[in-house]
Image (cartoon, helix red, strand yellow):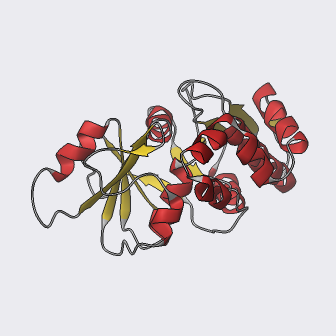
C-alpha cells in the first residue's frame, strides 16, 4: 500500500484521497454535518453557489463560504466552524465555496475513486476510513493557501500519516516524509496552526477562535464522503456524513 502526501493539489489520484484544508474549509464541513446538515455541495465558483439558490423563498440551500477569510457577499455564512457550531442545519443542504478547500476537492474528484474530507478534528476517523477503503494508495492532499504550501495543512497531513502508519505497512513518498517531519517538529496542534501564515492572518481578522477550534485533535468521528447519490447539480460535489 502506498502513502502519498501532496503539499498542494496535483491530480492523478488512482484510489483514496483525503482532502485537507484545516483553516478552515474541511474543519467547517465536518461541523456542518455534525450540526445536522443532510449534505454539503462543494462548488467550483461562488457564482455556482449563488445560482443554486437564486431568488426563491424557501430554498433548501444555505450558502457558506469565504474569500480571503471573509464571508462572500450574498452568502448566509462565512467559513467558520465556530459559527457553525451555534446553528442547527437539520434538513438543510449547505452549499460551500472557499478560496482553497473546495477547489482542492474538485481537483481530487477528477480522478480519485473515493474522496473524503479530513481535518485535525476528525483525523483519526478519517485515517481509519481511508485505510478500510483503500486497495492501492492513500493520497493526502493539502489545499494550501492561494497556491502556496500551508504549514497547517502539512502538519495535519503528518498527523494523518502517523495514524495510518500505526495501522499497517506503507510505502511512503517524500511528501509524506516532509509532513511527518513537520508534525514532529512543530509542537502541539494549536502551536502549529497559530504560527502558520494563514493562522496569523485569521488572527488579525479576529478569527482566532476558529484557529483554536480547528486545532482540536480527533474531537469528531464524522468523515464527509463524496457520493454520487441524489443527482447533484452541475458544478457541485455532494458530500454526506460517513
Q: Is residue 19 above or below residue 39?
A: above
Pick whichever, 174 or 59, lies toward us: 59
Q: Position of residue 237 (x, y in %)?
A: 37, 46
**Residue drawn 30% across the image and 68% down it:** 92
Q: Is residue 135 above or below residue 223?
A: above
**Residue drawn 62% across the image and 36% down it:** 142
Query: Viewed as shown, does residue 218 lie left or right of 179?
Result: left
Name the image quarter holding residue 174: top right
**Residue drawn 67% across the image and 58% down it:** 212
Q: Is residue 197 above or below residue 20?
A: above
Query: Viewed as shown, does residue 173 lie left or right of 19?
Result: right
In this rendering, does residue 167 appear at all? yes
Pick whichever, 89 or 161, lies toward us: 89
Query: Viewed as shown, does residue 233 lie left or right of 89?
Result: left
Q: Position of residue 143 (x, y in %)?
A: 57, 35
Q: Residue furthest left?
A: 56
Task: Please state, as top left, top right, bottom left or bottom right, where the N terminus lies in the image.
Answer: top right
Amino acid at each position: 500500500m502506498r502513502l502519498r502526501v501532496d503539499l498542494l493539489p496535483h491530480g492523478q489520484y488512482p484510489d483514496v484521497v483525503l482532502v485537507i484544508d484545516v483553516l478552515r474549509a474541511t474543519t467547517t464541513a465536518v461541523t456542518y454535518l455534525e450540526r445536522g446538515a443532510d449534505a454539503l455541495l462543494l462548488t467550483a465558483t461562488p457564482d455556482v453557489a449563488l445560482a443554486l439558490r437564486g431568488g426563491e423563498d424557501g430554498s433548501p440551500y444555505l450558502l457558506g463560504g469565504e474569500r480571503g477569510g471573509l464571508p462572500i457577499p450574498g452568502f448566509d455564512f462565512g467559513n467558520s466552524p465556530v459559527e457553525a457550531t451555534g446553528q442547527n442545519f437539520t434538513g438543510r443542504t449547505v452549499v460551500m465555496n472557499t478560496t482553497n478547500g473546495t477547489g482542492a476537492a474538485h481537483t481530487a474528484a477528477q480522478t480519485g475513486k473515493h474522496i473524503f474530507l479530513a481535518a485535525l478534528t476528525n483525523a483519526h476517523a478519517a485515517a481509519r476510513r481511508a485505510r478500510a477503503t483503500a486497495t492501492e494508495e492513500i493520497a493526502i492532499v493539502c489545499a494550501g493557501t492561494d497556491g502556496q504550501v500551508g504549514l497547517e495543512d502539512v502538519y495535519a497531513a503528518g498527523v494523518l500519516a502517523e495514524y495510518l502508519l500505526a495501522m499497517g505497512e506503507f510505502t511512503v513518498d517524500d511528501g509524506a516524509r516532509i509532513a511527518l517531519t513537520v508534525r514532529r517538529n512543530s509542537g502541539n496542534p494549536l502551536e502549529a496552526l497559530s504560527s502558520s501564515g494563514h493562522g496569523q492572518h485569521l488572527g488579525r481578522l479576529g478569527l482566532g477562535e476558529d484557529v483554536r477550534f480547528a486545532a482540536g485533535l480527533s474531537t469528531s468521528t464524522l468523515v464527509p464522503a463524496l457520493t454520487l447519490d441524489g443527482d447533484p447539480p452541475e458544478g457541485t460535489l455532494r458530500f454526506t456524513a460517513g
